[in-house]
Image: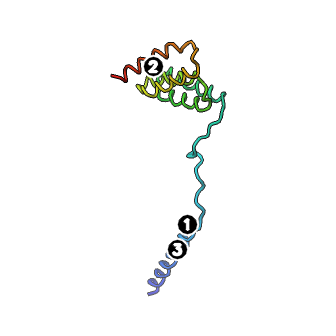
């Protein structure tokens, strides 16, 4: 009987500590928002854009066109007037067979640098992409 009484009090103690922990959970503050999930904010930063372009060129030379494309997009976000980044983005997307993405990037390049030495070859590639999509 004594053993039974101690078990009963153990259950009661376990129940009360369980109830206390539930109350503690209810009163705790919610965890702060993880800043890594916050949307990245871009402001004009030509040095960062240049850095992203260099890293993108590295990936492009290695044949990792998806990683290169992501870096070129980052470069264009840091500097929306960076014609070379749009040109390289078009090339990377072209290699990924993303014709619409390549077309958009090439058009932006032509808009930003119509007199660039690469502009004529980009215009020809735009025409080829337009013909291919018309088929």
- Estimate the spatial distance between the alpha carbons at disc 1 and disc 3, rounded to whole Å: 10 Å
The C terminus is located in which quarter?
top left
Q: In this figure, which residue is indicated by the disc labeled 2?
A: 126
Mark 1: secondary structure: helix
Q: Residue 64: in sight, yes or no?
A: no
Say if 41 sits above or below 4 in the image: above
Along the horizontal axis of the image, is 68 left or right of 35?
left
The N terminus is located in which quarter?
bottom left
- Quarter where residue 80 is shown: top right
- Estimate the spatial distance between the alpha carbons at disc 2 and disc 1, rounded to whole Å: 60 Å
Q: Where is residue 23 in the image (x, y as percent from the top left)?
A: 55, 71
Label 2 vs label 3, nearer the camera: 2
Q: In this figure, which residue is indicated by the disc labeled 1?
A: 25
Q: Residues within 10 Å of mark 2 (few under 14, many from 20)?
A: some
User: Residue, x 50% and y 29% (percent of image)?
Assistant: 67
User: Residue, x 59% and y 68% (percent of image)?
Assistant: 27
Mark 2: secondary structure: helix
Q: How crowded is mark 1: few (under 14 residues within 10 Å), some or many (20 or more)?
A: few
Number of numbered discs overlaid on the protein picture: 3
Q: In this figure, which residue is indicated by the disc labeled 3?
A: 19
Label 1 vs label 3, nearer the camera: 1
Along the horizontal axis of the image, is 132 left or right of 65?
left
Q: Position of residue 48 (x, y in %)?
A: 64, 30
| Disc with the residue nearer the chain's start (2 vs 3) | 3
- Estimate the spatial distance between the alpha carbons at disc 2 and disc 3, rounded to whole Å: 69 Å
Say if 34 sits above or below 13 in the image: above
| Disc with the residue nearer the chain's start (1 vs 3) | 3
Q: How crowded is mark 3: few (under 14 residues within 10 Å), some or many (20 or more)?
A: few
Mark 3: secondary structure: helix
Q: Residue 2: in sight, yes or no?
A: yes
- Quarter where residue 52 is shown: top right
């Amino acid at each position: 009987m004594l053993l039974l009484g101690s078990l009963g009090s153990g259950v009661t103690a376990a129940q009360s500590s369980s109830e206390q922990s539930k109350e503690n959970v209810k009163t705790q503050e919610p965890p702060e928002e993880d800043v890594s999930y916050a949307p990245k904010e871009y402001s004009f930063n030509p040095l960062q854009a240049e850095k992203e372009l260099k890293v993108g060129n590295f990936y492009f030379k290695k044949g990792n066109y998806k990683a290169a494309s992501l870096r070129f997009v980052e470069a264009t976000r840091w500097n929306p007037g960076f014609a070379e980044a749009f040109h390289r983005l078009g090339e990377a997307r072209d290699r990924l067979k993303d014709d619409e993405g390549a077309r958009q990037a090439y058009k932006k390049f032509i808009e930003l640098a119509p007199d660039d030495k690469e502009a004529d070859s980009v215009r020809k590639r735009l025409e080829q992409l337009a013909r291919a999509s018309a088929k």
